[in-house]
Image: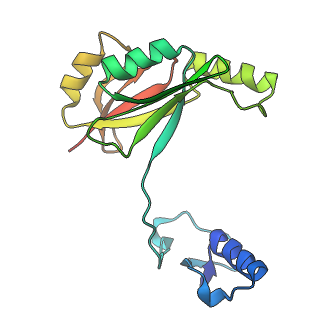
Amino acid sequence: MGCRIGLTRAAHHTCDAARLRGRTTAQQPWTVVVGSGDRTDQESRSAAHRTATSVSVMDITIHSTFLPHDDPDAALAFYRDILGFEVRNDVGYGGLRWITVGPADQPGTSIVLHPPAADPGVTDDERRTITEMMAKGTYAIITLATADLDATFERLQADAEVVQEPTEQPYGVRDCAVRDPAGNLIRINEIR
């Protein structure tokens, strides 16, 4: 086995785009991945071979995530009145509503509650599949966090469909899970 140094797919794309714009590759931000592999060029999943290193760091945050709703008023009541999130925006268009909510002390992080399959490129079959997956609670998930999981669960269990009571997971987190009115799975981790 030998060592290989290669550019990530994003770096290859950057290189191609730079050439098209007439820039030299020296003007581009590169990410170099260093790893070991064999002549088949297959990556190993063994922990012993995890030597990937990035030489560039991105200044990036999570701004918003999207969760579908099938009843905007029920979604609004759940996220505002039950979870205590502030409403940042409530936009209607064509009989549909997009509602943006988030924790009051985290103005840069939001959840956009959106009508599912509002994209005109979604087919009727895809809309049916999305509706079926939402009904089963397998379409969307979000993980939140709290310092006091037991108190949070105590407040939530009266108003939300409980999927899992607070549990110590074998992968190192303690969490619970509920569903919102649309069936979206909400896992809540305990901050330790």
Asked if residue 76 can be seen in this view, the reply is yes
Q: Quadrant of the N terminus?
A: bottom right
Q: Quadrant of residue 165?
A: top left
Residue placed at 32% from the left, 23% from the top? Answer: 83
Q: Position of residue 78 (x, y in %)?
A: 39, 17
Q: Position of residue 166 (x, y in %)?
A: 28, 26
Nearer the observer, 15 or 52: 15
Q: Quadrant of residue 169?
A: top left
Q: Position of residue 153 (x, y in %)?
A: 26, 22
**Image: 42 above or below 122:** below
Instruction: Tell me: 36 left or right of 117.
Output: left
Instruction: Tell me: 95 left or right of 163.
Output: right
Q: Position of residue 43 (x, y in %)?
A: 62, 68
Residue placed at 42% from the left, 38% from the top? Answer: 110
**Image: 53 above or below 98:** below
**Image: 46 above or below 139:** below
Asked if residue 181 can be seen in this view, the reply is no
Q: Quadrant of residue 103?
A: top left
Instruction: Tell me: 52 left or right of 188.
Output: right
Number of marks in the rendered image: 0
Residue placed at 46% from the left, 71% from the top? Answer: 48
Residue placed at 42% from the left, 55% from the top? Answer: 61
